[in-house]
């Protein structure tokens, strides 16, 4: 009998194959399986040739080839495919065996599966996997959550194959039930925000400043040496430089209509669900929706007038520095909002999230990897109970230094008619968050006026009162109505 496998991995699309190859290269014996079984042999004969990877011809065969407790990782399409496999697997597994879902599952599905599988004595882990195909092969960011008793059994494999920041693994235990997939979802939302912010900077440079693609590439290259140093800024520079066969920038030929797979939308939905103002990610999702109305926009562009001038007339070099600062300050707000959402969800579900650990998980391997995440990790190391990133001294100072530029860039963009939904919503959030007083007093009065919803008086918090604003309609507040 040949060597037993440390782990089985089901799902031989590129991510699954690359994770298997990664595990193999780190010395783990992996058993590969796939719904379409022919793909197993094909994988063994090609990509996995010359490795220790073994294959299975059926789920029974796969289970028989595993060390105990058995570890089975699913990398299949999110949704019913995960449930189907779980249903087929459980009769073949024993209590204490571990099922890991490494797909892009919704955290609510992971919560449900955790509950169902716990009642049968299985350990279930929902793990966020980020970093695309390359990450999967050479070091992804991994965000495991679920049944904590399962973690020691997969920790050596997960921390062995993940990306490293210095010597530290970009993978640690996130929290109970759906915490891993929730954190992955917020990661994706933040990714939407980061991408849209970069797009807005590019839009101002291209339309407002009239810069060429090579000039813009130089700017991004320069930005990548400072506080914005990140994977997304780096690839943007490469994209801007990329020439098509005819020598012109390929980017110019790409249809400006964005696609989306949904995880940004889920983050925005969660933000609404938990009443957390994650405005930047919400705007980033809507910006994609607006872009996809290409045909309507083409018609509207011929009818709807814009700014008197769309060309910037000031000092370009100085303004580029300001755009960098505006991007940086907006990015700080975006991450502050993302962590606010994590905090609210943790409160709702009683998760004990390690915020610094999460920043470290995102520091390497994934799409939002950046130097900036090291700063966030440091902020939570200084104060693990930090209530908001904006209140950390480092970020407070960073926003203070960028603030004037940020205001000027947003104002200029508005004057030039260049849409900056994420930069401007971040600034509005910042101004709201730092305001001791907001006009919600009027809002409360309006609610009480038309709906007798009551309000609190300053200095008498906790006591809700109603005013008869019109002299008719009575003094009864809405909460006392029965119908
Ligand atoms: P396949 O090769 O048999 O299509 C990514 O699509 C991975 O998820 C593939 O390994 C694919 O298997 C698997 N997959 C997709 N839908 C599935 C389903 N409904 N049941 C099982 N596996 C599925």
Image (spheres, rainbow, N blue to C red):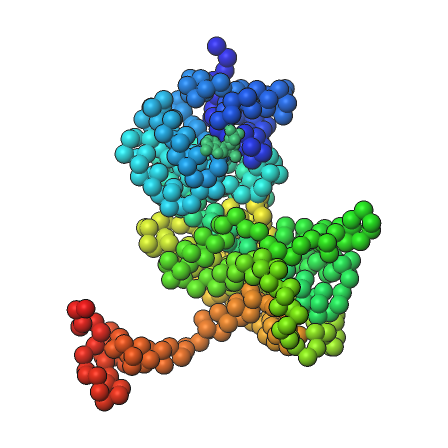
Quadrant that contains the C terminus:
bottom left
Q: Nearer the viewer, residue 251 or 316?
A: 251
Q: How many marks?
A: 0
Q: Nearer the viewer, residue 461 or 82?
A: 82
Instruction: Check the image and name the residue furthest to the bottom.
Output: 471
Question: Residue 218, how many percent across, how many down?
Answer: 75, 58
Which residue corresponds to the image point at 50% horizontal and 53% vertical from the top-left?
A: 264
Which residue corresponds to the image point at 38% horizontal and 41% vertical from the top-left?
A: 110
Instruction: Check the image and name the residue furthest to the right.
Output: 246
Question: Residue 355, how many percent across, how many down?
Answer: 44, 52
- Quarter assignment of residue 388: bottom left
Image position of 360 with respect to 403: above or below: above
- Quarter assignment of residue 197: bottom right
- 402 vs 263, left or right, is right
Image position of 2 with respect to 481: above or below: above
Question: Residue 167, how many percent across, how many down?
Answer: 57, 41
Question: Residue 391, how many percent across, how many down?
Answer: 47, 66
- Quarter assignment of residue 84: top left
| Residue 192 visible | yes
Image position of 352 with respect to 126: above or below: below
| Residue 144 visible | no
Which residue corresponds to the image point at 46% horizontal and 61% vertical from the top-left?
A: 278
């Amino acid at each position: 009998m040949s060597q037993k496998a440390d782990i089985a991995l089901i799902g031989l699309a590129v991510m699954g194959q690359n994770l298997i190859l990664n595990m193999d290269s780190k010395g783990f014996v992996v058993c590969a399986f796939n719904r379409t079984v022919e793909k197993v042999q094909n994988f063994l004969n090609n990509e996995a040739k010359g490795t220790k990877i073994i294959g299975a011809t059926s789920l029974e065969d796969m289970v028989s080839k595993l060390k105990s407790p058995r570890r089975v990782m699913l990398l299949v399409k999110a949704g019913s495919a995960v449930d189907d496999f779980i249903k087929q697997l459980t009769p073949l597994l024993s209590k204490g065996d571990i099922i890991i879902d490494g797909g892009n599952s919704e955290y609510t599905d992971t919560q449900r599966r955790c509950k169902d599988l716990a009642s049968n004595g299985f350990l279930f882990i929902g793990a966020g996997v980020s970093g695309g195909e390359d990450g999967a092969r050479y070091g992804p960011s991994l965000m495991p959550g679920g049944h904590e008793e399962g973690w020691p059994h997969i920790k050596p494999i997960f921390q062995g194959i993940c990306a490293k920041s210095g010597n530290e693994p970009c993978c640690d235990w996130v929290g109970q039930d759906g915490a891993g997939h929730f954190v992955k979802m917020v990661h994706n939302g933040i990714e939407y925000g980061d991408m849209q912010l970069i797009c807005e900077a590019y839009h101002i440079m291209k339309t407002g400043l009239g810069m060429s693609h090579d000039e813009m590439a130089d700017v991004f290259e320069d930005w990548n040496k400072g506080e914005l140093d990140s994977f997304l800024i780096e690839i943007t520079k490469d994209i801007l430089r990329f020439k098509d066969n005819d020598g012109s920038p390929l980017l110019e030929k790409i249809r400006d209509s964005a696609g989306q797979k949904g995880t940004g939308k889920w983050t925005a939905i969660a933000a609404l669900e938990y009443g957390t103002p994650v405005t930047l990610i919400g705007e980033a999702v809507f910006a994609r929706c607006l872009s996809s109305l290409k045909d309507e926009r083409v018609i509207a562009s011929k009818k709807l007038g814009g700014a008197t001038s769309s060309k910037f007339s000031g000092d370009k070099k100085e303004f580029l520095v300001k755009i960098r600062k505006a991007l940086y300050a907006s990015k700080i707000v975006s991450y502050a909002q993302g962590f606010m959402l994590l905090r609210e969800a943790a409160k709702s579900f009683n998760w004990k999230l390690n915020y610094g650990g999460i920043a470290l998980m995102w520091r390497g391997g994934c799409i939002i990897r950046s130097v900036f995440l090291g700063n966030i990790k440091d902020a939570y190391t200084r104060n693990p109970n930090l209530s908001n990133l904006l209140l950390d001294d480092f970020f407070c100072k960073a926003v203070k230094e960028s603030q004037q530029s940020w205001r000027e860039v947003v104002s200029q963009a508005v004057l030039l008619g260049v849409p900056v939904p994420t930069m401007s919503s971040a600034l509005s959030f910042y101004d709201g968050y730092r305001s001791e007083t907001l006009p919600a007093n009027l809002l409360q009065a309006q609610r009480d006026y038309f709906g007798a919803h009551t309000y609190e008086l300053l200095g008498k918090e906790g006591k809700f009162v109603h005013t008869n604003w019109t002299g008719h309609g009575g003094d009864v507040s809405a909460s006392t109505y029965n119908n």
